[in-house]
Image: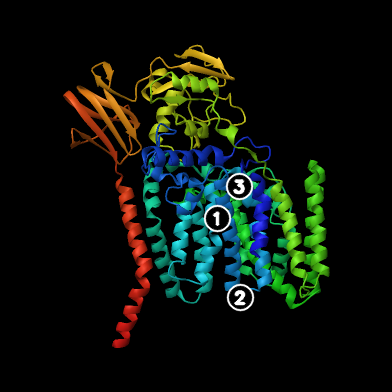
Amino acid sequence: MWLIWGGWLVLLLGPQANRVPYPVNGAFSDLVVAHFPQILYLRRALTHWHTLPLWAPTYYSGYPFYADPLSGLWYLPGWLGVVLPLPWGVTLTVGVHWLLSAWGMYAFLRALGRKEKGAFLAALAWLGFGKIWAHWAGGHLTLLYAVAWTPWLLFASERRGRLLRPGVVLALIFLADPRWAVYAGVLWAAWEAKKHRREGRVLMRVWLTEGLIAGLLAAPLAFPLLRYTHLSTRASLTAQDVLLFSLPWSRLLGVVVPIGGMTEWVTYVGAGAVLLASAAWLRGRARFWAAVSLAVLVWALGEYIPGLKWLAHLPGISWLRVPPRGLFLLGFAVAVAAAAGWEALTVSWPLPWQKRRNLLWFAIVVLGFSATLLSGLLIGDTFMAASSAFWLVAGLVAWRTHPHKSYALWVWALVIAVDLLAFDAHLVAPRDFAPLLQPAPVLEEAASQTQPRFRFYTPSYSIPQQVAAAQGWELANGVDPLVLASYADFMKEASGLWWDAYTVIVPPLDLDDLSTNRQAVPRADLLGLLNVAYVVAEFPLPARADFTLWAQQDGLWVYRNPQVRPRAWVEQGDGWRPVDALHWTPNRITITASGPGDLVLSEIAYPGWQVSVDGKAVEAQTAYRILRSVPLDAGTHTVVWRFRPWDLALGLLAALVGWLWVLFEPRFAGLKAASEAGR
């Protein structure tokens, strides 16, 4: 079985080993835009500065690396993709996660007492679930890491050990991607409630114990993230922001019809998996998983369901932004039900139930075939129309293949695998890796002709984040779900743009039209405060913009900023002068400067940065609403900024307590039992 699962992954991931997945007809991949910059910066910090970075300067003029879930800093299994060469190191890491996930599904079902063959088919259906591969194409790396642990969370509920217990697995999920931890946590809580529905005290004890362990172990990310989120634009999400990309009613058809398109809306679970799951549900089995499927489908509809906008205002719901992401649980539930369906077929075949239920099962085959064929013909999708044949084949296999025959398992496995493999491969369009990191020659020339530390600003995203990270360049703009609210407000003035809605791109940009911000007039003085030496765009700036055209080459307009400030300067009255020396590392910045005046550092002010002047701790100040500053007396001074966030220290301490609890709880339990026996 391991060979089957491994072969599946090789077929899908093999062609991408030295390439990068992209959605079919998609221009962007989060793997490239959001995750590769984090990996490249982490590598650089480890090899160049020989330190574990807590702060990153790559975009947004700096941000707390240790508090950003996309950094992957606290998710240790993800470090395999950091230490191995790109891009195949990341591909291998994803493959390992999903091979383990298939094993976890199999182990969970066997723990429930499901038959080996049914568990194998369920693992195959879970491994091939279309949504998983759509998100791989979209580059949602940390989300895939987190979802892969879902079977192990429920297995730990059934076969709890010292380390493999729900609290530990749930913490691992949170450290991989906090968004999925909410869905996984709700699923686990509901599963425990199903197990202990008549034992209220036991249920509460399990919830509290495992929940507390999960909270303690996840604290190194949880505490910093809560603080960062509170200071970010995400703290003011509206209901519309939370329910973004809600699943349209018409896309419910995608559960049984192999519809591609937008990553978030892909839900195809496969004809074979649907038939097996239906066999269980029509027989009255796996009702819990039917309820899970229905619940996540309703939630995925989001704004199209009356009342859910009100629900989006509740505390914590903002973590569930983009409701269709919960549909991973649909594929999980259908796969688990498919294992029960296999057993239902083996109990009575070929007419296992009442005539009415047989007709319903037959109707599912007809409807699946008809919907797939008609949808393909109506939109002119040859692949979709041809995929209708899988419904006929699956129906024929279900009707004519006796489950007790030795070949039955392999026939069903072939139907499920070929159907899903064809669809999954249809979602991913790999691209060559090297060109994605290659900067335009004009930008390399510009970077070589300015001060050692400076920033670019690009209103048209003309310098992708992965290119900047590969070159060691810094950006004033950026793409990340978390951006400090104070910085976003500053950039509204600096960029000459104004926006009210939440955005993951600052300043906002229509990715289908990179010239969206053509009419904006950036302010040279404010960008100068951010150490922006060049403005780069795919269009000329308005004539009234206070910049000097430096070059027009490689399809780019490159402007010098005549009002650029150095990375640090001393202000006195209306004038300023550069500092004498500056040494920058991720967690420590040392400056030699002459007073009197206010030393201003063009780095974002964030809680945790501590400053000392000539070895004496002083109180840090904020300049221009977002930059760090400290007053200096007359004379030459050594100023040292250190990043020592208390929330991280508290999180690490909590994690230590959690691990001591996990490791020594059995010993304490044994001592308690011995003490009670002695009485």
Where the N terminus falls, by quadrant? bottom right
Disc 2 crowd, CA 10 A, few/some/many (<14, 14-19, 20+): few
Is residue 598 placed above or below 167 in the rendered structure?
above
Amino acid at dot 2: Gly
Residue 313 vertical position relative to residue 512 in the rendered view, above or below: below
Q: Position of residue 379 (x, y in %)?
A: 78, 41
User: In the rendered structure, which disc, 2 or 3, sits on the residue that comes first in sequence?
Assistant: 2
Q: Do the CB atoms of the residues marked 2 and 3 lie less than 8 Å apart?
A: no
**Residue 114 makes an appearance in the image:** yes
User: What secondary structure is marked by label 2?
Assistant: loop
Viewer-proximal residue among 454 and 168 = 454
Asked which secondary structure carries label 3, the reply is helix
Residue 306: in sight, yes or no?
Answer: no
Residue type at numbered disc 1: Val
Q: Which residue is mark 1?
A: 147
Which image quadrant is residue 583 in?
top left
Q: Amino acid at mark 3?
A: Trp
Q: Return the residue at label 3.
A: 136
Q: Secondary structure at mark 1?
A: helix
Question: In percent of the image, x 66 and y 62: which residue is there?
Answer: 3
Quadrant location of the C terminus? bottom left
Left or right: residue 349 versus residue 541 is right
Give the side of residue 366 with respect to residue 230, left or right: right
Mark 1 or mark 3, which has the lower sequence index? 3
Q: CA distance from mark 2 to mark 1?
A: 23 Å
Residue under label 2, please give it: 113
* In the depicted structure, whether residue 5 falls above or below residue 579: below
Q: Residue at x 37, y 54 (%)?
A: 219
User: Outermost residue, left direction?
Assistant: 634
The picture places residue 500, in percent across and down from the top left corner, at 48, 33
- Of residue 423 and residue 375, the one placed in the foreground of this image is 423
